Amino acid sequence: VQLQASGGGLVQPGGSLRLSCVASGFSLNRYVIGWFRQSTGEERETVACIASNTGSDGSATYAGSVRGRFTISRDDDGNSAYLQMDNLKPEDADVYYCAAKRYGWCSSVMDYWGKGTLVTVSS
């Protein structure tokens, strides 16, 4: 069972990145999927969370700091999830993690976590 996050990199302020999260060993379709970010010494922040399309409505929530700039989506056929990040700001620089949870909503306690992918926003 594994979640693999990728897509991080260096981008200039105002630029875009798309993070990917691919699951293996289990099916994501009944799981809530979240994207989180964390800097060293700081608490992990929930960036975005998306409900399952199976038994739920696939709705999403966002942290206030990213609402309108980031979009979370899921591709259950591809067993994947994505985080489209537009108009990136220096304060968005962080290590980003994807995670999945079978019951409940995104929180610091998730069933599966992927390894982080580093996003750097700098000119």
Image (tube, rainbow, N blue to C red):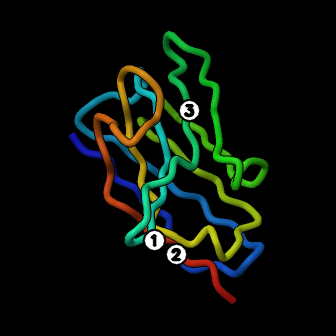
In the depicted view, which residue is nearer to us: 30 or 102? 102
- In this rendering, the label closer to the viewer, 2 or 1: 1
Q: Is residue 51 left or right of residue 39?
A: right
Type of the residue with mark 1: Leu
10 Å crowding of disc 2: few (<14), some (14-19), many (20+)? some
Type of the residue with mark 2: Gly
Give the image location of residue 62, x and y in percent: 65, 42
Q: CA distance from mark 2 to mark 1?
A: 6 Å
Q: Is residue 74 left or right of residue 3?
A: right
Which residue, given by chain and number where applicable, does mark 2 sit on?
9
Q: SS for tag 3? A: strand
Vertical side of 121 occupied by 99: above or below: above
In the depicted view, which residue is nearer to us: 89 or 25? 89
Q: Which mark is residue 118?
A: 1
> Is there CB contact under 8 Å for labels 2 and 1?
yes
Type of the residue with mark 3: Ile
Which residue, given by chain and number where applicable, does mark 3 sit on?
50
Q: Is residue 117 left or right of residue 119?
A: left
**Which residue lies at the image location 43% right of the left edge and 37% below the top edge?**
107
Give the image location of residue 34, x and y in percent: 48, 41
